[in-house]
Image (cartoon, rainbow, N blue to C red):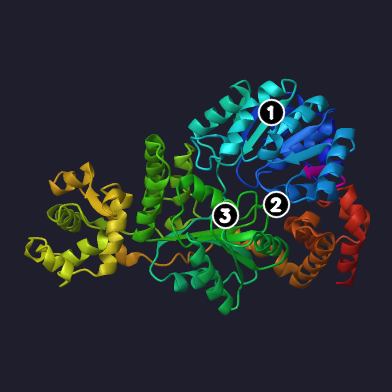
């Protein structure tokens, strides 16, 4: 890449070198070529368009879906001395007019807009007169109906290539399978551009999945060694969010709830607190997440099943954006499976869309019950080969497999003999010989299968059914109120034509996996060297951030503070060699941080 781009990286952003593939993307966009870029979260996508924006001699438009994301990126640019602005509903009319004038006059190089604000005829005409060199579409998967986060307002962006023929279009996303990528490229630049896929692997994330038995106990065990870290706990409903946040608060955690049912001002206040304070747990529905660029989130825990593999990947991707080790845990049960099926059926009338979403959910269930490396299973969904990671629950504590064919035949017989019309609870009652009124009313106590499974507990049969659903032996029919129904695979087992390989149920435990020594050492290296100094540096950073009303990481990232604590610079020249401290940050903050080092 040219010296100019490298100089901007060094002199504006304070980094000595590009991360993998950043240079190639910057080169394409700087030469006026269209590009769809798929990079994992934390790979440095924003620099891929911020550097070209400073290289090009005409303005840049950035389309972003969330006000918080726009404001955080602008705050980060301004701290580095880059003039950037936004026009959105969170600003006063006077602020919006002032920002537009700065952009139109050339005093400001980047303008951030929501798709709704950009795609008004008045705004399009005004921007056409400025002849932008680059239009960036962030979270580009939102434009595709093949994706899982389709937003109708994004679809309007498909006219940009005609309205702005002299502008390069850069589309960025962390999550897009092959069909979605092709759809994005077709919509945004009619296929006339490059598609660059860096990959989906996040090797710093520890992946774990466990059946949900007692979420309170399992959650506290997961959080036991994370009291000083920030994280996200995802819940399916607003009510559950409030319950979990209250439970954690009573146990001494700084936990706050976030969901769409809250007042908008409260959501903004809660988000600002999470972004700025240390060791805060955000207990949230999926209303929280897109565009959350907090680099030091150390864990993500799902207390309910996510919607599909893409959503799961996006949500766990909010952890460990700084490249340091982070943990994930998903808990799920049969009721989650049923609820997710129900959501798909209620999602409009497009039958083809429903089929796709059911298949996506099938893939997630198969991942949950996988007995091999989790990372291999996750990446294979995105058509990316991988070797065993040694950093997931299945690698660290390989599950025991056994022959479950005999019990599978019992289960499938009970489902068939009861007419494939009942959910798991009734089938288990039949198998265990329960004396319920429902069984008596239907004479199910006269069936051959009645009581045939009494040697196992309810918990065993619940886990067995989950594995059978995840393995596509059974389906959950939402039209029949969650009835379990046999697939061809189950019929084959019942006919003696197959073997049911069971992940040993008694061996299932909460995912308290030991960390690889390599990852653990990386996470605590600085803290062991000088925990007090790092604490003081973080306290100063928080004060500076609060004074400027920006998230703490906008001042300096954790990796930069760690490097300061490790190298202990005593001059501004030494401070300037640390990654992430450009000239403007050195001028604003260098002396203050150096004084903290000196006092230690």
Q: Using the rendered view, name the quadrant where residue 129 is placed.
A: top right
Q: Earlier in the sequence, mark 2 or mark 1?
A: 2
Q: Earlier in the sequence, mark 3 or mark 2?
A: 2
Residue 547 location, x and y as percent? Answer: 85, 63
- The stretch in magenta equals 80-86
Residue 529 location, x and y as percent? Answer: 74, 68
- Nearer to the camera, 536 or 390: 536
- Nearer to the camera, 596 or 50: 50
The residue under the point 59% across, 22% down is 191
**Whether residue 429 is situated above or below residue 560 in the rendered picture:** below
Q: Using the rendered view, name the quadrant where residue 161 is placed.
A: top right
According to the image, label 1 marks what residue? Answer: 169
The residue under the point 78% across, 44% down is 86
| Circles 2 and 1: CB atoms closer than 8 Å | no
Q: Is residue 370 visible?
A: no
Circle 1 Cα neighbour tier, 10 Å, few/some/many (<14 / 14–19 / ≥20): many
**Whether residue 534 is situated above or below residue 471 in the rendered picture:** below
Q: Is residue 229 left or right of residue 504?
A: right
The residue under the point 70% across, 33% down is 120
Q: Is residue 315 left or right of residue 415?
A: right
Q: The residue tagged with tag 3: helix, strand or loop?
A: loop
Q: The residue tagged with tag 2: helix, strand or loop?
A: helix
Residue 593 location, x and y as percent? Answer: 87, 63
Q: Is residue 199 left or right of residue 580?
A: left
According to the image, label 3 marks what residue? Answer: 287
Circle 2 Cα neighbour tier, 10 Å, few/some/many (<14 / 14–19 / ≥20): some
């Amino acid at each position: 890449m040219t010296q100019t781009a490298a100089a901007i990286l060094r002199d504006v952003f304070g980094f000595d070198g590009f991360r993998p593939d950043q240079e190639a993307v910057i080169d394409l966009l700087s030469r006026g070529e269209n590009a769809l870029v798929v990079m994992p979260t934390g790979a440095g996508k924003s620099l891929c368009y911020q550097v070209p924006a400073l290289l090009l001699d005409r303005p840049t438009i950035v389309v972003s879906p969330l006000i918080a994301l726009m404001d955080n990126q602008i705050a980060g640019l301004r701290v580095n001395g880059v003039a950037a602005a936004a026009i959105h509903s969170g600003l006063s009319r006077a602020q919006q007019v002032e920002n537009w004038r700065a952009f139109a006059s050339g005093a400001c190089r980047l303008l951030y807009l929501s798709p709704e604000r950009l795609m008004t005829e008045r705004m399009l005409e005004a921007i056409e007169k400025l002849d932008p060199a680059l239009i960036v579409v962030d979270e580009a998967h939102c434009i595709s109906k093949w994706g899982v986060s389709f937003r109708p307002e994004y679809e309007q962006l498909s006219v940009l290539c005609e309205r702005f023929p002299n502008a390069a279009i850069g589309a960025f996303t962390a999550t897009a399978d092959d069909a979605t990528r092709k759809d994005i490229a077709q919509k945004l630049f009619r296929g006339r551009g490059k598609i660059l896929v860096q990959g989906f692997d996040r090797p710093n994330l520890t992946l774990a999945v466990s059946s949900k038995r007692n979420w309170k106990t399992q959650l506290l065990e997961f959080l036991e060694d994370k009291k000083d870290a920030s994280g996200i706990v995802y819940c399916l409903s607003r009510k559950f969010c409030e319950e979990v946040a209250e439970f954690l608060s009573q146990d001494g955690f700084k936990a706050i709830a976030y969901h769409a049912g809250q007042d908008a001002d409260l959501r903004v206040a809660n988000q600002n607190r999470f972004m700025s304070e240390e060791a805060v747990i955000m207990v949230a529905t999926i209303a929280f997440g897109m565009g959350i660029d907090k680099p030091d989130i150390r864990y993500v825990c799902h207390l309910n099943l996510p919607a599909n593999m893409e959503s799961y990947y996006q949500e766990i991707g909010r952890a460990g954006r700084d490249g340091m080790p982070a943990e994930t845990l998903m808990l799920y049960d049969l009721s989650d499976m049923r609820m997710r099926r129900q959501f798909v059926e209620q999602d409009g009338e497009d039958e083809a869309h429903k089929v796709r979403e059911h298949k996506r959910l099938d893939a997630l269930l198969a991942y949950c019950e996988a007995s091999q490396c989790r990372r291999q299973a996750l990446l294979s969904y995105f058509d990316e080969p991988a070797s065993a990671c040694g950093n997931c629950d299945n690698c660290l504590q390989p599950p025991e497999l056994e022959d479950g064919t005999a019990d599978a035949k019992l289960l499938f017989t009970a489902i068939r003999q009861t007419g494939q019309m009942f959910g798991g609870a009734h089938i288990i009652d039949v198998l265990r010989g329960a004396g319920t009124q429902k069984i008596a009313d239907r004479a199910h106590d006269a069936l051959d299968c009645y009581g045939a499974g009494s040697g196992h507990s309810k918990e065993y049969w619940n886990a067995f059914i989950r594995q059978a659903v995840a393995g596509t032996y059974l389906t959950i029919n939402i039209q029949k109120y969650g009835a379990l129904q046999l697939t061809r695979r189950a019929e084959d087992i019942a006919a003696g034509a197959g073997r049911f390989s069971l992940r040993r149920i008694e061996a299932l435990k909460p995912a308290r996996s030991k960390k690889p020594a390599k990852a653990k050492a990386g996470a605590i290296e600085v803290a062991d060297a000088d925990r007090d100094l790092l604490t003081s540096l973080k306290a100063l950073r928080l004060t500076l951030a609060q004074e400027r009303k920006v998230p703490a990481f906008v001042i300096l990232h954790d990796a930069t503070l760690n490097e300061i604590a490790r190298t202990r610079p005593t001059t501004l020249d030494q401070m300037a060699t640390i990654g992430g401290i450009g000239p403007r940050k050195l001028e604003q903050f260098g002396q203050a941080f150096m004084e903290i080092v000196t006092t230690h």
